[in-house]
Image (cartoon, grey):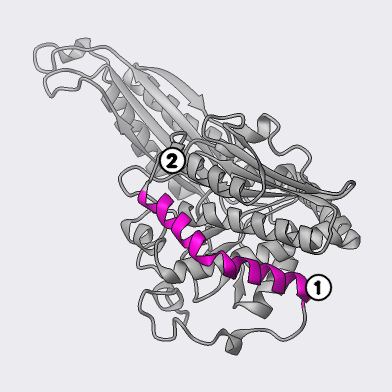
Amino acid sequence: MAQSASTVFWQPGDKGAHLDRADVLEEGTIYRPEFFEHVQATLKSLDQDLIGLSKDIHDHPELKFEERHAHDTLTTFVEKHGFHVTRHHWLETAWLAKFTKGTGGRTLGVNSEMDALPGIGHACGHNLIAIAGVAVAIAVKSAIEHFDISGTVVLLGTPAEEGGAGKVILLERGAYDGMDACLMCHPAPGPRWSTSLSSCLALQRLIVEFSGHTAHAALSPWEGQNALDAAVLAYTNISVLRQQLKPSHRVHGIFEGKDWAPNIIPDYSKMIGDVRAPTRAEVDSAVPRVTACYEAAGVATGCKVKLEKTRVISDLRQNKALSDECADIFSKKFGPVDYEYGIKNASTDFGNITYALPSLHPSFAIPTRGSNHTPEFAEAAATEEAHKACINMSITLAANGLRLLTDDAFANKVKKTFEEDKVLREAEAAQA
């Protein structure tokens, strides 16, 4: 019998939460263990500073494009650690921290997210993502200096992951140019001390406005064109459509209005909906079926329909070479690796980065009674266990990045698997 998520996933107060993880580690050596040991020692020496940084961001939640406190706090922190910092990089609350040694080396990119959610704060754990990026960049910089490695590490502070597609904007404006690969990570529910190398869902947001005509709802309703009815019909149409969509697809949203009153036929309503599927190609295929639901509602009610499509958020294409290296390091040093949990059924704007260049976005489990985007997860993101899990993941990513900078054969394999995935994407698009 299959176990439920509640029995598989790490819960607060679980017995064995502090178990000796040597019992579940795989045997074998990793690439250049001295790199791993140096990274581990570097981050151990910074542990209290990183805890304080995480708590500061957690205690000051800021919404998309408003991450001013996080921007200033993070840039000040990394500047003190010897990075050349560019504040307000392409966007007001985006930033860049860069360190280079020698000439001719490769460039490793790293991302730090910062934004919180309306009403529930850091319920997606972006305080942990912020310090993970900082930890990876500082550890890689330290190793570059200690082992005399030629290369560059670039840390991007990326605003507005939650509904603002901040990374997509930065990608379009050239912020990722020159990177040989880019790394980041994300907290999520999962088995104790585990990491997940799953993908996530691609997403297209649709914003629809219905415009009708007011009338007295009792005296002369036949003179009106009811925009609220249009929204209700569209919502119902989408509910009916779900029967014909694949189980892996998601369509969800809200509708709202202005100046509504029960004795007035509403002349305006607005719907905001998301269409998600396992690949960008499948989203592209599903969107016309959803837009037909809106258009049909407009025809039925006599309302005008204005439809806006925001930027497409792509699925995660985990680079196979980077993913395999991550799994090798993590399974031998920290705990189990899976390909089914993490943020598999959520979405992230980092997906677009994985389409543009070789990238990796593992999830790491933290103990929580609620999934992402709940008050329980916000509470979990500030715990000691969540911090430890975040540092384990950061050490793994730093070691992975150091292999990219120092191993020519591995770097070529990263490029090769990225090109192979491009071919696979084209086949998926044709099938969809």
Q: Which residue was labeled with disc 2?
A: 69
Residue 400 as seen in the image, left or right of residue 25: right
Q: CA distance from mark 2 to mark 1?
A: 38 Å
User: Picture quarter containing residue 255?
Assistant: top left
Vertical comparison of 96 with 307: above or below: below
Q: Where is residue 352? Give x, y as percent.
A: 65, 42
* Residue occupying the point 60% across, 58% down: 135
The numbered disc on residue 209 is: none
Amino acid residing under circle 2: His
Q: Which residue was labeled with disc 1?
A: 32
Q: Please check the rendered image and state whether residue 49 is part of the magenta-colored stretch, yes or no.
A: yes
Q: Please check the rendered image and state whether residue 94 is part of the magenta-colored stretch, yes or no.
A: no
Could you tell me if residue 196 is visible in this image?
no
Residue density around tag 2, few if under 14, some if 14–19, many if 20 or more, within 10 Å = some
Q: Nearer the viewer, residue 68 or 430?
A: 68
* Residue occupying the point 65% across, 73% down: 330
Q: Where is residue 218? Give x, y as percent.
A: 9, 17
Q: Where is residue 213? Give x, y as percent.
A: 27, 12
Viewport quadrant of the C terminus: top right
Q: Where is residue 300? Give x, y as percent.
A: 35, 23
Residue 417 as seen in the image, left or right of residue 306: right
Amino acid residing under circle 1: Arg
Q: What segment is highlighted magenta in the picture?
A: 30-59
Judged by its main secondary structure, the magenta piece is: helix
Secondary structure of the residue carrying tag 2 is helix
